[in-house]
């Protein structure tokens, strides 16, 4: 039987979903869905189930979520705990519903299909890593995502975005979409460059991949001065990595 994967990339701004064949080629791209707020674990499960119902060929599901995901369970998640979305006021009821929620187990039960739930940057990385050396993925979108791989093996997830950087701001707020809109791409790109320069001594990667919806907005001049290899990866990696992500379990 052919393995047909539904890959769902859940972002703070939008939800993208595609059906992929065994080679990772796209069979169907579902229309882009603006993330509805408030969004509970139950509502997100219902959205994912609608994708599954729409194509009877699907026999496994990969879901990428923002935040810290450990063994399919939500440890910390941004945006979805806010009643009106990114940078909004935290809703204590949503926070209680999301933190500690085992999304992977819940989807396995609801969909009756094998389901893999990872951090969204980890799925981006699964699409592009070579499996050699220390490879790091940074995704720039609503906030900052991060994934680290050593010789193809996924390292424990670090929520780098929660660290403070300037004026007591979190990296997420300092480099996120709201700041980009306020500053414009050129000044924001300087922040991206400064952030990468500060992160490198902490990680000392062999290769750096930059993805996410805002990766295409980073100026070329901001990336020219680095001594190590930097590669821009397409935002579509968030879904096309949905097949290779299953290999990360080994």
Image (cartoon, rainbow, N blue to C red):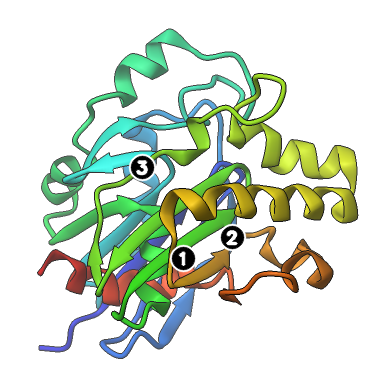
Tags 2 and 1 in contact by the CB under 8 Å rule?
A: yes
Q: Residues within 10 Å of mark 3 (few under 14, many from 20)?
A: some
Q: In the rendered image, which residue does mark 1 sit on?
A: 238
Cα–Cα gap, marks 2 and 3: 17 Å
Q: Name which residue lies at 57% across and 27% down.
A: 164
Of tags 3 and 1, the one toward the viewer is 3
Cα–Cα gap, marks 2 and 1: 8 Å
Residue 232 appears in the rendering: no
Which numbered dot is residue 158? 3
Query: Which quadrant holds the N terminus?
Result: bottom left
Q: Quick check: 221 above or below 198? A: below
The image shows residue 73 at horizontal and vertical percentages of: 21, 38
Q: Which residue in the rendered view is the most extreme toward the top?
A: 92
Q: Quadrant of residue 134?
A: bottom left
Q: Quick check: 185 above or below 132? A: above
The answer to whether 113 appears left or right of 223 in the picture is: left
Counting residues from the start of the chain, the first of labels 2 and 3 encountered is: 3
- Depth check, front residue: 161 or 226: 226
Q: Name which residue lies at 53% across and 21% down.
A: 82
Residue 138 appears in the rendering: yes
Counting residues from the start of the chain, the first of labels 3 and 1 encountered is: 3
Tags 2 and 3 in contact by the CB under 8 Å rule?
A: no
- Depth check, front residue: 97 or 147: 147
Which numbered dot is residue 120? none
Q: Name which residue lies at 35% across and 80% down.
A: 20
Q: Secondary structure at mark 3?
A: loop
Cα–Cα gap, marks 3 and 1: 18 Å
Q: Secondary structure at mark 2?
A: loop
- Depth check, front residue: 202 or 165: 202
Q: In the rendered image, which residue does mark 2 sit on?
A: 212
């Amino acid at each position: 039987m052919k393995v047909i994967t539904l890959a769902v990339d859940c972002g703070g701004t939008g939800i993208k979903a595609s059906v992929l064949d065994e080679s990772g080629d796209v069979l169907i791209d579902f229309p882009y869905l603006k993330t509805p707020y408030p969004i509970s674990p139950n509502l997100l499960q219902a959205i994912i189930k609608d994708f599954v119902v729409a194509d009877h060929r699907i026999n496994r599901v990969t879901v990428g979520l923002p935040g810290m995901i450990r063994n399919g369970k939500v440890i910390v998640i941004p945006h979805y705990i806010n009643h009106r979305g990114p940078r909004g006021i935290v809703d204590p009821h949503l926070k209680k519903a999301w933190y500690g929620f085992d999304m992977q187990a819940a989807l396995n039960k609801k969909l009756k299909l094998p389901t893999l739930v990872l951090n969204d940057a980890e799925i981006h990385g699964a699409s592009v890593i070579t499996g050699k050396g220390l490879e790091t993925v940074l995704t720039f979108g609503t906030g900052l995502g991060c994934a680290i791989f050593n010789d193809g093996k996924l390292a424990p997830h670090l929520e780098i975005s929660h660290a403070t950087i300037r004026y007591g701001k979190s990296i997420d707020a300092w480099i996120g979409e709201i700041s980009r809109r306020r500053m414009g791409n050129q000044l924001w790109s300087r922040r991206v460059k400064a952030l990468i320069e500060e992160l490198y001594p902490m990680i000392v990667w062999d290769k750096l991949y930059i993805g996410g919806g805002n990766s295409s907005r980073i100026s070329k001049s901001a990336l020219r001065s680095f001594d190590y290899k930097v590669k821009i990866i397409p935002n579509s990696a968030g879904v096309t990595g949905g097949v290779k992500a299953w290999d990360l379990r080994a």
